[in-house]
Amino acid sequence: MSGSALSIAEHHCRRCGTCCRWEGDVCLTQADVRAISAYLHMTEEDFINTYCRLQRNRQGLSLMDAVDGACCMLREDNTCTIQPVKPQQCRDFPQRWNFPGWEQRCPAARKGGATC
Ligand code: SF4
Ligand code: SF4
């Protein structure tokens, strides 16, 4: 994964929720599972059974998809249900990981993107 340093330095998330609707996995580390289940006042087993599925490569857990394909933790107003403990993958985008062309899919990376 890579991206231009300039685009990342200028990145100001608009909380548009677009990246929470992208196809693919919202990967969970063991620390993510621990933190999110505690935040939701659930046992880790209940959290996994209720909100998790296998990653497409079957190498770990992902948050489930909603019916429309968005992350199951995305609310209608584009806020994240688990914002204070959202997975490392979510916290790291786009500064620590991204992919070719991400600037075209993330409104905040485009020229003139507003801060939020
Ligand atoms: S697509 Fe970009 S601007 Fe929109 S929520 Fe994701 S990081 Fe923020
Ligand atoms: S956990 Fe929150 S920030 Fe991460 S993809 Fe789901 S809704 Fe978006």
Image (spheres, rainbow, N blue to C red):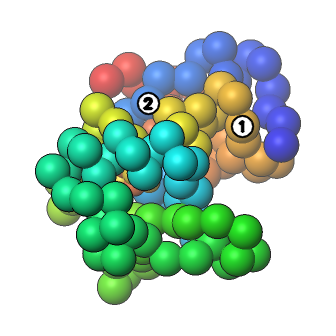
The x, y position of residue 61, in whole percent, is 56, 66
Residue denoted by label 1: 97
- Kind of element beneath mark 2: loop
Q: Is residue 104 visible?
A: yes
Q: Is residue 113 above or below residue 33?
A: above
Task: Name the outermost residue toward the bottom.
Answer: 67
Kindly tell me whether mark 2's CB lies below 8 Å from ligand 1.
yes
Quarter of the figure with the N terminus: top right
Residue lying at 72% horizontally and 37% vertically, measured from the top left: 97
| Label 2 packing within 10 angstroms: few (<14), some (14-19), many (20+) | some
Q: Give the camera-side residue of 12 and 25.
A: 25
- How far apart are the alpha carbons under marks 1 and 2? 15 Å
| Pair 1/2: label in front | 1
The x, y position of residue 51, in whole percent, is 34, 70
Residue lying at 57% horizontally and 48% vertically, measured from the top left: 29
The x, y position of residue 43, in whole percent, is 25, 59
Q: Give the camera-side residue of 28 and 12.
A: 28
Residue denoted by label 2: 13
Q: In the drawing, does residue 22 fall left or right of residue 56?
A: left
Q: Is residue 83 above or below residue 36?
A: above
N-terminal of the pair, mark 1 or mark 2, is 2
Kindly tell me whether mark 1's CB lies below 8 Å from ligand 1.
no
Q: Give the camera-side residue of 41 and 88.
A: 41
Asked whether the residues under the numbered discs 1 and 2 touch, taking CB atoms below 8 Å apart as contact, a structural biologist would say no
Q: Amino acid at mark 2?
A: Cys
Residue lying at 43% horizontally and 51% vertically, measured from the top left: 33
Residue lying at 75% horizontally and 75% vertically, measured from the top left: 57
The x, y position of residue 2, in whole percent, is 84, 36
- Kind of element beneath mark 1: loop
